[in-house]
Amino acid sequence: MQTFRGQSLRTMDAKGRLSLPSKYGKAPGQAYVITRGLDDCLFVFLKDEWKRLEQKLMSLDLESKHARFYVRQMTSNAEDVSVDSHGRIMIPPMHRKLAALDGEVLVIGALTRIELWNPETYTKYEKGFGLSFEEVAEALLEGPDDRPPEEERRSKGRRR
């Protein structure tokens, strides 16, 4: 499975064509699926990764209104795109509008997907997150054994 990492500022032309960084693979005919992302960006998946995501979406509980909404948003906004002979993908007009893309596009590798951001939107997202990188890392990486003893006792008391 290919993974994506790093970031690059690219220019999208007036027709919505965007050249991806070469390290992401831009052989003519390379197939991707572009869809609505989270936090006002677009997600771009390789076809194989999209198929894995579809399997996860199919496993969601259809009785859940949240699941139905999420599945509808992800799939109704999904479009197949492929790399042209000049190493570009076409960002459909609907997607450009969803992510407010015009001119400069911040391309971010996010392991299983590529994210396309309006650079200003991404800056606002980072600044408005409310926690520092270190605080987020600590919250995600600390396990139950890493908590201070008083917090461990309090959480055990809540489980009873």
Image (tube, helix red, strand yellow):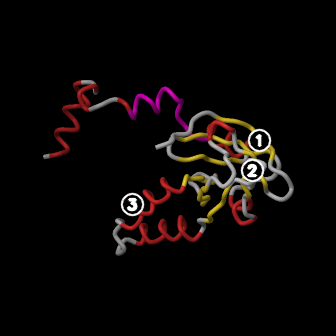
Of residues 82 and 72, the one drawn nearer to the viewer in this rendering = 82
Query: Which numbered disc flags the more N-terminal residue, 1 or 2?
Result: 1
The vertical placement of 101 against 71, above or below, is above
Q: Is residue 12 left or right of residue 81?
A: right
- Mark 2, secondary structure of its residue: strand
Q: Give the extent of the magenta segment.
A: 128-140
Of residues 15 and 134, the one drawn nearer to the viewer in this rendering = 15
Contact? badges 3 and 1 (CB < 8 Å): no
Q: Can you identify the residue that label 1 sits on?
A: 10
Q: Can you identify the residue that label 3 sits on?
A: 56
Q: Is residue 136 left or right of residue 159?
A: right
Amino acid type, callout 2: Arg
Amino acid type, callout 3: Lys
Query: Which numbered disc flags the more N-terminal residue, 3 or 1?
Result: 1
Tell us which disc is closer to us: 3 or 2. Answer: 2
Q: Measured from the top left, where is residue 70 in percent x and y?
A: 48, 65
- Mark 1, secondary structure of its residue: strand
Q: Is residue 135 left or right of residue 157?
A: right
Amino acid type, callout 1: Arg
